[in-house]
Amino acid sequence: MPAAGRGTRLGADLPKQYLMLAGRSMLEWSVQPFLIDAACRGLVVALAPDDEHWSQVRSRLQRVPIEAVGGAERADSVRSALQRLQASGVGADEWVLVHDAARCLVTPAQIRQLIAACQHDPVGGLLAQPLADTLKVQAPAERADADPRVSATLERSGKWLAQTPQMFRLQALHDALAAVAASGFAGITDEASAMERLGLKPRLVEGSAQNFKVTYPADFALAEAILGSRA
């Protein structure tokens, strides 16, 4: 779980993974389904080197995750966590799930659904949602303060919104990230995109619309409402 980001789009003083939601930090909600599910044998959390908040979260967890040093980019953090697993003796062919710290609404059932769908797959896969809305392309702005305009409408059939967890074998994912590290991970926005660069085709496993990434203040309010309704 990469958790070294700042979450600046939320406009908060704290890194967003440490903001409180329904009585717990977002990071606690995100890690808990993996710690209580017997299908997951362990968890590595990649943290910023100067993280001052993790120790309080760690003290409240039922199981203590392994810690890794995160990087400036998400892919740096994931790669560091994979290397930490390798150093701890995890085999090259073991399955690894990567999950966003800001997707605090994932459930154990969704995790098990992904594992069941991908455990015999030659590549691996990810939770995702078929695109339901009409997709627009923004026209290039003539000046910086211009209102955004539409330049085209894209065909939405066959398009999916990627979610996490994403599930791949340890060595294969590490090699895929290593292959694009020299470019600064340009264009690599998730683990599946790194695997795609190698010509592989990850499996799409339909997830839930509630498994969204908390990015903006409105997302925060919706996540809190959903967690409250579950309680």
Image (spheres, helix red, strand yellow):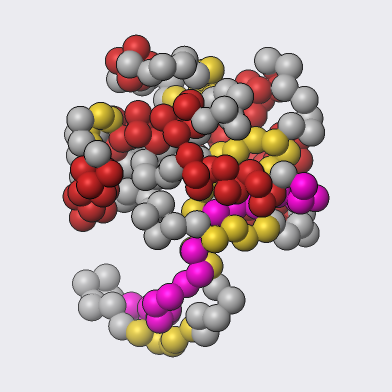
Q: Is residue 31 left or right of residue 117?
A: left
Residue 205 position by quadrant: bottom right
What residue sits 70% from the left and 36% below the top? 95
Q: Is residue 112 left or right of residue 168?
A: left
Question: Of 54 and 63, which appears nearest the observer?
Answer: 63
Question: Of 229 and 2, which appears nearest the observer?
Answer: 229
The picture places residue 202, in percent across and down from the top left corner, at 69, 56
What residue sits 45% from the left and 34% below the top? 33
The picture places residue 183, in percent across and down from the top left corner, at 64, 47
What residue sits 54% from the left and 25% below the top? 43
Spot the residue most to the bottom.
152
What residue sits 63% from the left and 44% below the top? 115
* Residue 178 seen anywhere in this rendered image of the structure: no
Which residue range is magenta in the image? Answer: 120-141
Eyeballing the image, is 104 above or below 81? below
Eyeballing the image, is 206 above or below 50? below
Question: Of 193 and 202, which appears nearest the observer?
Answer: 202
